Image: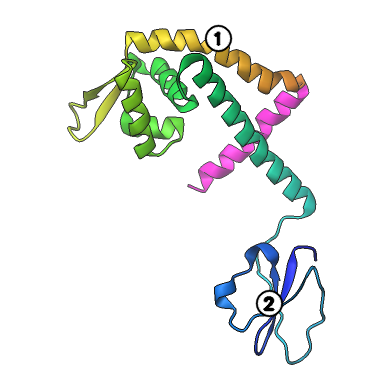
Amino acid sequence: MDGVVLVNTARSLWVIPWSRLMWKNLPGKKILGKGTVVQPGPSTIAVMSAASWLDSDEQRVWRAFLRVNSVMHDELDRDLQRKHGMTLVEYGILVHLSESEGKRERMSGLADTVIVSKSRLSHQVARLERDGLVRRETCEEDRRGSWAVLTESGEAALRAAAPDHVTRVRECLFDQLSAEHIAQLHEILNVLEAGLSRGR
């Protein structure tokens, strides 16, 4: 029961996970003790969330996943900014444009491709446009929309950054894993991506 608190109100005894304690909803509260277990009597009400809480192994996996994802993103972003003056998101924009037909893509589609909000994408494209790496063009089919187009300078910047970025990706990820690990990771990511796609 570690991480559970017992809160005594005027008429009830509440059993609540420590991280879910809602002070404003518990008038006259008094914490009896973290991690304490009490058998509620007839005049008390024991209330626990119906959520399916993570067990200790699941917590370790989940927190490790978040930590590795955050550290790796920050490291790759910092490396690109230090060596080539662009963020990881900006690099991703250049990559996707370079792979698109005509080296251009609708702004609305680009936001989904690089997995950022439209407002952040607009800010990042504005920075790339300022540096001459991308230009925006009006969409003839939809005057409210616009295209992001990769310029020659953008292609050159991508060619210059790609070798260093790929090297750092390999150092941070693939050099740490065996061929078996990589195959397992690929399978796990496919399962997770499929599950997230069904939930949309």
> What range is drawn magenta here?
180-200
**Is residue 174 shown to the viewer in this render?**
yes
Percent coordinates x, y for residue 143 in the rendering: 17, 32
Percent coordinates x, y for residue 102 in the rendering: 32, 14
Write the residue at 67% across / 31% down. 187
Q: Nearer the viewer, residue 149 or 154?
A: 154
Classify 117 as above or below 104: below
- Horizontally, residue 124 falls left or right of residue 27, namely left
Write the residue at 66% across / 69% down. 49
Tell me the SS state at disc 2: loop
Residue type, label 1: Pro
**Label of residue 163 in the image:** 1
| Structural distance between the alpha carbons of marks 1 and 2 | 57 Å
For disc 2, the marked residue is 47
Query: Is residue 196 on the magenta stretch?
Result: yes
Dot placed on the residue nearer the N-terminal end, 1 or 2: 2
- Horizontally, residue 134 falls left or right of residue 78, namely left
The image quadrant of residue 174 is top right
- In the picture as drawn, the residue positioned furthest to the bottom comes out as 43
Tell me the SS state at disc 1: helix
Write the residue at 34% across / 32% down. 123
The image quadrant of residue 26 is bottom right
